[in-house]
Image (cartoon, helix red, strand yellow):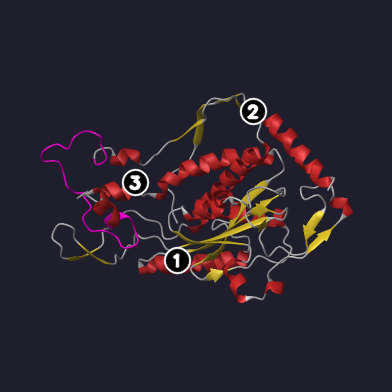
Amino acid sequence: MRSIEKDRASFTAGVRYGETFGAPVLVEIENLDHAKWTEIMTPSPRQDGASDERVLTRPRPGHADLSGGLKYGRGDLRDALERASARTTASRVAAGSIAKSLLAEIGVEVRGFVTEIGGASWTVPQDPDWTTLFARAEASDVRCPDEAASLAMHERIDEARKLGDTVGGAFTVVARGLPTGLGSYAEWDRKLDGRLAQAVMSIPAVKAVEIGLGVECGRRLGSEVHDEIRFDEALRGSGSGGFFRATNRAGGLEAGVTNGADLIVRGTMKPISTLARPLGSVDMVTKLPSPAGYERSDICAVPACAVIAEAAVAFVLADAVIEAYGGDTIHDLRAHHAEVIARYGRA
């Protein structure tokens, strides 16, 4: 893993004295690497005799190079390469941080961490201490809460580096404090599980999304999948009106609607497509076999993907919260949220 960006965000519009005031929020993130690419990515017309040094004609397997070049008729595949870059996710993380601030206003916390890299894995324990787990993830450079698993993940990354290869892995995003009722069981496009799956799957290189038990549901009996419902009078004033699940195999969602339990979303990321020892490809100009092009590349991006997924989940949840509680101000939203929770308690 490496980093050529500091990702320092600056609010340049829409925020005053630490609060939004109705104008569009503008967040600027400086691309420190841009200076090296001003000539090759210039918006000016191409000059006669300009260097072809960075023209890309050898598409990389697993990337958008070939399909993008064919789709838009571009001989230089760099147009697809740059537009499909995961660098665009920086803006999603910035927007997700704002969404997390909104969610915090009603007591919702969203965190992401890594559970697997290159086959080295770690399983979240039953009834975890989320506060400790999140803190350990933040302290780990691979964003894994378990020290032994983190060391094994480092070994897999080092092995891939020596081979000129890359590794993928898996991550989990947990949202705590969600009230019952976000989403819809009636309209397909408002079902929260579908919206979350689309948001996480849209992150570059993510190839699978699971909620709760995920694919394991298909291997178990119904009695081993569904969560029994209980009631506790002491929890009547909570976001579920006192009802709760004895387990959380559903991952906090039933029929497209939150059920008051922790939301658990998992994703799997494939290895990065750019390899230091490129796979075979074909040159777009000569049509002859050729090694795929090579661009600057990390060995593993799973820890970064966990952060992006955290932001993507937060953005979807914030949208669902606004949809459910509405209002023109954060004060209205908090009041409407409190009214709904009080109604649950009277059920």
Whole-percent x, y for residue 166 in the image: 40, 64
Element type at mark 3: helix
Ranked by sequence position, the earlier of labels 2 and 3 is 3
Q: Horizontally, is 268 left or right of 324 in the view? A: left
Q: Quadrant of the N terminus?
A: bottom left
Vertical order, 98 against 304 (above or below): above
Going by the numbered disc 1, the residue's amino acid type is: Asp
Camera-near label (2 vs 3) is 2
Element type at mark 2: loop
Dot 1 corresponds to which residue? 158
Q: Horizontally, is 46 left or right of 206 in the view? A: left
Cα distance between the residues tagged 2 and 3: 35 Å
Front one among 265 and 338: 338
Whole-percent x, y for residue 142 in the image: 54, 58
Dot 2 corresponds to which residue? 328
Within 10 Å of disc 1 (Cα), the crowding (few <14, some 14-19, many 20+) is: some
